[in-house]
Image: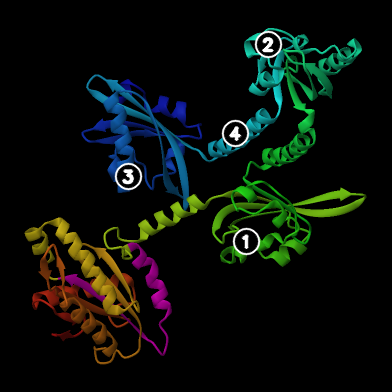
Amino acid sequence: MSQNIITKNQFHLLYDLTEDYVFFMKKDGDSFIYEYVNKKAEEIFLECPTGKRMEHCLDEFHYKTILFHYNRACKIKHSIFYQDNHFLHNETIVNETTVIPIFNGEEVYILATTREVTRTKEMQEATYILESYRKGVNDAALVAMTNEVGIIEMVNKLFEETSQFNKSELIGKSFRMINSHFHEEDFFEKMWETIQKGETWRGQIRNRTKYGSFFWVDAHIIPITNEQGVIEKYLTIQFDNTEKKRIMSELRNIERSFKLITDYSNDLIAITDAEGYLLYSSPGHETILKYDKEELFGTYYLDLIADSSIKLLDAEEFFSSGEQNKFRTELSLKAKDGSTIWTDTSITTVENTVDDQKEKWFVFVSREITDKRALEDQLKYMAFHDSLTGLPNRRLFQDDFPAALSSVCSEYPSIGLLYIDGDNFKEINDQFGHEVGDQFLMHFAEKLQESVNSQYKVYRIGGDEFVIVIDQVKDYIDNISPTIERVVQSIQHTLSKGWVIEEIAFTPTSSIGISMFPNDGVSLEELLYNADQALYTAKKHGKNKYIYTNAVHIS
């Protein structure tokens, strides 16, 4: 029993205060049973999952994904790590999960810990940017690290190339190895006095290479302290004078960009004046949106926002308001080639004083979420559409129906609901197999759509059952509607053309039950039930029949 490993009280004492989702599960055949979940994990479920099998608590896609990783951990008898995502509160959550298999005699358990990784991704992005800066400095500057007494512990490749000393010749020695004896001793004494106070020293030094030639550098010596404030090392960054103007300009840009990046940890950063004209744009606008810096400077920043999302930001009101300190939304930005990307954008009002004059700036900080939006759209589409036919499913049918009801008025007082079932579909499956059966359903769905010519929506609500909603009906009189009749006849005519699957010719027919709002019901449940009963009656009369709830018509 699982309580021999960990009791319920022990589990909750250990895991209820964590921000991670924690699950303790027992293997049961090909599945797993929830033994315990912590308080954070309870948010995922509509009801308590304890004692229930996993497939009874999760949707099929999510269940199969988790089952695959759990079984893999049990098979290799070792912990594993994987990433996945799920919907929670209408938001796609990216997760990292650690799965630990536990073996207790014949019994097998899983302890799974899931963590949301939004912050981790932000840190990865920031780390990537910092690594890019590190590489840039390494490519442009001579870098060395010494201990607290000036003994060299590390040099970069450019330091070796410029000094012509190998790393092995430098490490463990002092900078006297490259001393050109150009400077007086008090020059270095003042330098040491500065850095030992914990201050950065800057100055020009003439150094000597291994073979006696000289090179001048602009040197920056930066004390590195531990958590107690004690200096442990010194970082030396030296720029060759021939590159000084270019490198120092790049360094100033890096320092400004680095401050903004550390403040906001985002990819696209722009600063505008009070009217919205660009004062500064980060390199991301060049690498992601493909603009040249010269093209952007002084332009109206909102011109970069795509028409599809400009309505999300009332530009005139925003830029004129003195009360709007921060605003966050999702905006679509236009690249130079006309393509667009989606971003999560924060806009902050900043007041600055320049020459005793107060100025208002706006800082736009954006992170690209194009892939996230695409995933959300894909998952939303999958949630509301049938995977085989691509038609809207029962869930979307239920969501759409209120809009159809809203079309009811004195001119169009009725709505028709056609419940359609393919005749002899089971026999097709039995005779030709499910693969042919699936292709048959796909053709059947296409023909239904063709028959209504996009005027009405076709839904697949299960198996070979389809629903078509005919709105704005104004001619339902004496239990018959010419509008409905035309749609039914179009369906029958279109299906009668048939199709060929794997050299097998099919000429399908359908049975149709028809219910009318409000005569046969005012709720979706009533209309579906009555249409289903009419469909059942139509099938009893034979193939290729349609029947109203309140009247029978044989085609």
Report the side of 231 relative to 7 (left or right).
Answer: right
Q: Can you give x and y, in whole percent of width and height, for residue 60 in the image?
A: 30, 47
Q: Quadrant of residue 204?
A: top right
Label 2 sits on a secondary structure element that is helix
Give the CA distance from mark 1 to mark 4.
28 Å
> Which of label 3 and label 2 is nearer to you?
2
The residue that mark 1 highlights is 305
Give the vertical position of 472 relative to 540 (above or below).
below
Residue closer to the observer: 338 or 438: 338
Quarter that holds the C terminus: bottom left
Please tell me the numbered disc located at residue 170.
2
For the magenta stretch, what is the residue range?
A: 395-422
- Foreground mark, 4 or 3, reads 4
Label 4, label 3: how many angstroms apart (C-alpha)?
A: 38 Å
Which residue is at the far right? 356
**Circles 3 and 2: CB atoms closer than 8 Å:** no
The disc, 1 or 2, on the residue closer to the chain's N-terminal end is 2
- Quarter of the image for residue 465 reads bottom left
Quarter of the image containing the N terminus? top left
Disc tally is 4
- The residue singled out by tag 3 in the image is 57
* Among the two numbered marks 1 and 4 on one chain, the one whose residue lies closer to the N terminus: 4
* Element type at mark 3: loop
Residue at left 91%, top 12%? 186
